Image (tube, rainbow, N blue to C red):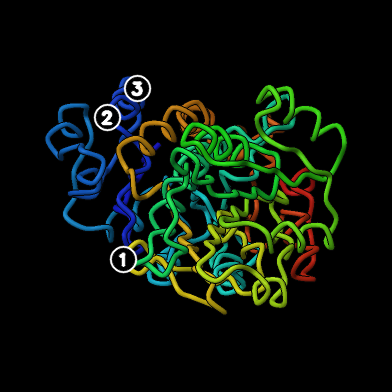
Amino acid sequence: MLVGVPAEIKPEEYRVAIVPATVRELVARGHRVEVETRAGLGAGISDREYAEAGAIVVDDAGPIFERAELIVKVKEPLAQERRRLRRGQAIFTYLHLAPDRAQLDDLLQSGVTAIAYETVTDAAGKLPLLAPMSKVAGRMAPQVAANFLQYFHGGRGMLLGGIDDVPAANVLILGGGTVATNAAGIALGMGAEVSMAVRSPAAAERIVQRFDGRARAIVADEKMIGELCRSADVVIGAVLAPGAAAPKLISRSTIAAMKRGAVLVDVSIDQGGCAETSRPTTHGQPIYVVDGVVHYCVANMPGAVPRTSTFALNDATRPYVLALAEKGIARALREDAGLRNGLNVHDGKLTCRPVAEETGLPYMSPDDLL
């Protein structure tokens, strides 16, 4: 199989989908790999390293999209990339289709087979390809919040961990999953006061046990979330509905009632965001202010640490890339129910139920198409 790795073109995105070690494995098994020149530079990987691993380094993405049977990326294909996709070809990447109707329509029209990292499941029903980037984003969130709490960024002028008898910042984390627990661990390590709003008593109990009672766990409804946000110095949005848009847990009125200079880090922004005032930003222009609340809504947070993120993501995706190349797309999907859960679009059909429910478009079961 010809596997193609184009350079990412999303603004300030420097991760790359495949590292030389995976190229070496693919080539050893008789496959060809084409990598766009400079695709790995942000992650500290040179064209020479790819070439030494057996890849063919090409000057631009055009030939990759034209020839590759499997395209492996990090972020969703942008409009100029989607125009190059075609029926009979597969793309394996993060898609986040629910809040992105333009991308969904283009993928359906192209006829491409689109497999989303974020909806692939393992034997336990967890999300193994979302987890590494969730860990990175979660660990980054308190660092980001600490930076933008500084006065000259519009923040409250607070040190996240406080000092001596001066209180630490009150950090509220919405969610209890991978992003949330990683964010809590870092925030606690920085000395913050941490509360986590979760949906069930069982989740609250897990949080308390995990952090030995150092993090406060609260079973919260919409009203309670509003009250907690109003008393917080930092809110980290870490909610996830796999494949679907993030629930809007923070209303405009709640934002208006929050402390001036409070910081919202909406890690859920790649699925539309969990606040009514959230909209995607970039690393180059990461923040904006609404009613005095600093909003950080960068949709590719792990792109700020592309070397760590690239290798962590590649470790998770490697077995799936090898299976797709070795078995062929259709057979690999048929034989692995977890990988099949990652199938979002196939041959002009929408095959992801949560996206269908979100958009109102017809859903077709992958089992009926493969």
Q: Is residue 209 left or right of 211 when viewed as pictured?
A: right
Q: Mark 1 or 3 closer to N-term?
A: 3
The residue labelled by disc 3 is: 25
Q: Residue at x 29, y 53 (%)?
A: 7
Q: Mark 2 or 3 closer to N-term?
A: 2
Q: Secondary structure at mark 1?
A: loop
CA–CA distance in space, label 1 to label 3: 36 Å
Q: Of residues 344 and 117, which is closer to you in this image?
A: 117
The residue labelled by disc 2 is: 20
The residue labelled by disc 1 is: 284
Q: Residue at x 45, y 66 (%)?
A: 82
| Amino acid at dot 3 | Glu
Q: Mark 1 or 2 closer to N-term?
A: 2
Q: Residue at x 54, y 46 (%)?
A: 167
Q: Residues within 10 Å of mark 2 (few under 14, many from 20)?
A: many
Q: Is residue 229 left or right of 300 when viewed as pictured?
A: right
Give residue 34's position: percent from left, percent from top. Answer: 27, 43
Viewer-side label of 1, 3: 1
Give residue 316's position: percent from left, percent from top. Answer: 49, 29
| Amino acid at dot 1 | Gly
CA–CA distance in space, label 1 to label 2: 29 Å
Give residue 118's position: percent from left, percent from top. Answer: 60, 45
Q: Secondary structure at mark 2?
A: helix
